[in-house]
Amino acid sequence: MTNILILGGGGMIGQKLAHHIAREGWHGQPASVTLHDIAFPPDGAPAAQRITGSLADTDAAEKLVASRPDVIFHLAAIVSGEAEQAFDKGWQVNMFATWNLLQAVRAEHEASVGSYRPRLVFSSSIAVFGAPFPERIDDEFLTAPLTSYGAQKACCELMVSDFSRKGFVDGVSIRLPTICVRPGTPNKAASGFFSGIIREPLNGQEAILPVPDSVRHTHASPRSAVGFLVRAGTMDLDPLGARRSLNMPGLSCTVAEQIESLREIAGADVVACIKPVPDEAIMKIVEGWPRDFDPSRAKALGFEAETDFAQIIRTYIDEDMTAG
């Protein structure tokens, strides 16, 4: 039986991934899943174990890796807005905890005389890129982040690649677009309003729009995010060679196009719940993010995402609106 460890397993994507594995198994076979996070939702996804704690805690990584999981999904992080505001915390949680995790895997690899080499899927971000951008970012564009969060993710990508090159781990970093529409309550992510302007109006609540509706960004649904993770966890990584980071596909659209899709699906009264309230701090962060991608490499490897924003809204309505 495949043993799977999901770090950040109490979060939205971690929970959806655990639900998926419970339904579908791993390579069509049952799997044993361990979830690790600082907290878990009530009546959450099924798991063999739920371990409460922070990956940044002393010896946390060593204890988690001691059981030698076959597959590790590293989704644990503090989000972009919080990482920008809490500088030390961002680096401790988002970067140094990843270093400790990789060192723990390396120690088990060496203790096993090289027989232990788990698949590691690291959840990275398009925040690893910084302006100025071309019209569309291709697979050759350099990583030059303009936020602390982006810098932390870029450092982790390099570590995953180097530990893979040395043979300690079989790792891949997937750069997620903004995941939208997120269910539940808002978090501290600077990108949170992209979900908020859809989620809150659909639930009859006011939503704040802190940026002009001309802002363009790239999105994928939570359903697509789970698909990315499963693909990264099961595919043959040899075609990647030494380039172990991949830009995920997504839908590039403006805020105005998001709102128009909402209008078409739910009507003008729902759209009226969106209130423009400019926020210079949010706008400064968003200006440093890429707007569109040509993810040819990922698409050739079988990664897929939505092709219009109405699909993303309908996914939220079908899967999460009642829970949200």
Image (cartoon, rainbow, N blue to C red):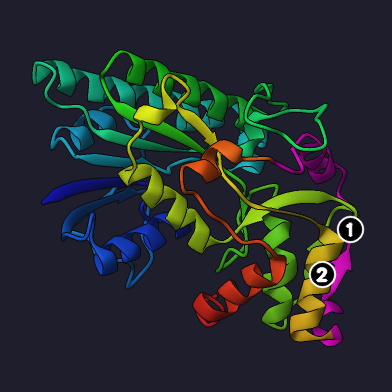
Q: Residue at x 57, y 73 (%)?
A: 315
Q: Is residue 53 visible?
A: no
| In the depicted structure, whether residue 181 falls above or below residue 264 | above
Residue 316, label in figure: none
Q: CA distance from mark 2 to mark 1?
A: 9 Å
Vertical arrangement, residue 289 with respect to residue 155, above or below? below
Residue depicted at x 10% and y 51%: 1
Farthest residue toward the front?
300
Q: Tell which of 296 and 151 is nearer to you.
A: 296
Residue 90 is inside the magenta segment: no
Hey, what amino acid is under mark 2? Answer: Ile
Q: Residues within 10 Å of mark 2 (few under 14, many from 20)?
A: many
Pointer 1 residue? 213
Q: Is residue 253 left or right of residue 322?
A: right
Q: Can residue 249 be seen in the rendering of this structure?
A: yes
Q: Which residues are magenta?
A: 268-293
**SS class, disc 1:** loop
Q: Nearer the viewer, residue 109 or 54?
A: 109
